[in-house]
Image (cartoon, rainbow, N blue to C red):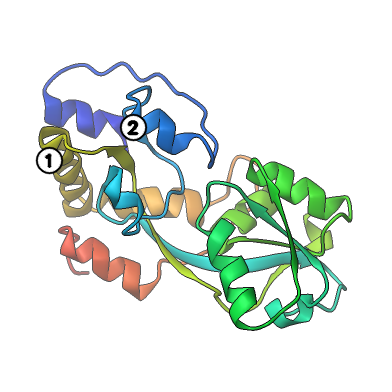
Amino acid sequence: MRVEVIAEELGKDVRVVQRPVTPENRFDLVTSGEIDLDCGSTTNNVERRKIVAFSPTMFVTGTKLLVRRGSGILNLRNLEGKTVMLTRGTVHETAIPKLAERQKLGIKFVFASDHQESFQMLAMGKAEAFANDDVQLYGILAETKSRADFRVVGDFLTYADYALMFRKDDPEFAEVVERAFRRLAGSREIVAIYERWLLKPLPSGVRLNLPMSPHLEELFRVQGLPSD
């Protein structure tokens, strides 16, 4: 999302103040009014919509496992009796332990305050896997010099729609966000933004090489993306 688009919709200059957030504190910062728009990798689901509002979907992903290359771990069942890192404030914090319980897997879960801490625990050998959305795992590896030592494995354990998050009960701002998304889709700029971050080289020089899924493309078409 380009903030300039929202500024144009509001018809006024908007001064952007970037405020770092963590998966754990982002909801409190939005509901308290300390930030107006969370532009991170936040999953839109029923429980969260009780306290915040969301933009149209901007990405579709799901949970996979990051493991050390050569570990022999290919899926959640291979983690019986082992330790898995999860980040607090994410959907995985509750979803993955419930999934392990349903499958009667004796997995130990350790919780970190942010994704970097979760990854560091894996890198230091204090856990055998880090469960997170695959796009975030690929993003972490892209910024890691030792990326060749790790691999993302397994089928999707959960599915998630990412969206921008903002305060609830503000219909005027919600309409501004909706119109901004429709403009980005209608001009195809939303595709250019996707390609910039998910297909082209990142600042580190690494490419994530994650082509747009047919499902996400169809969601963008609902927002106004023209047919090819």
- Figure quadrant of residue 81: bottom right
The answer to whether residue 84 shows anywhere in this view is yes
Kindly identify which residue carries mark 2: 31
The x, y position of residue 192, in whole percent, is: 35, 51
Going from N to C along the chain, the mark reached first, 2 or 1, is 2
Q: Residues within 10 Å of mark 1 (few under 14, many from 20)?
A: few
Q: Residue at x 41, y 66 (%)?
A: 212
Kindly identify which residue carries mark 1: 175
Left or right, 20 with respect to 140, comes to left
Name the foreground residue: 99 vs 11: 99
Name the quarter where the C terminus is drawn. Answer: bottom left
Residues at marks 2 and 1, CA–CA distance in whole angstroms: 18 Å
Q: Residues within 10 Å of mark 2 (few under 14, many from 20)?
A: some
Amino acid beneath label 2:
Thr
The x, y position of residue 161, in whole percent, is: 38, 61
Disc 1 element = helix
Left or right, 73 with respect to 13, comes to right
Name the foreground residue: 14 vs 71: 71
Q: Residue at x 64, y 75 (%)?
A: 100
Disc 2 element = helix
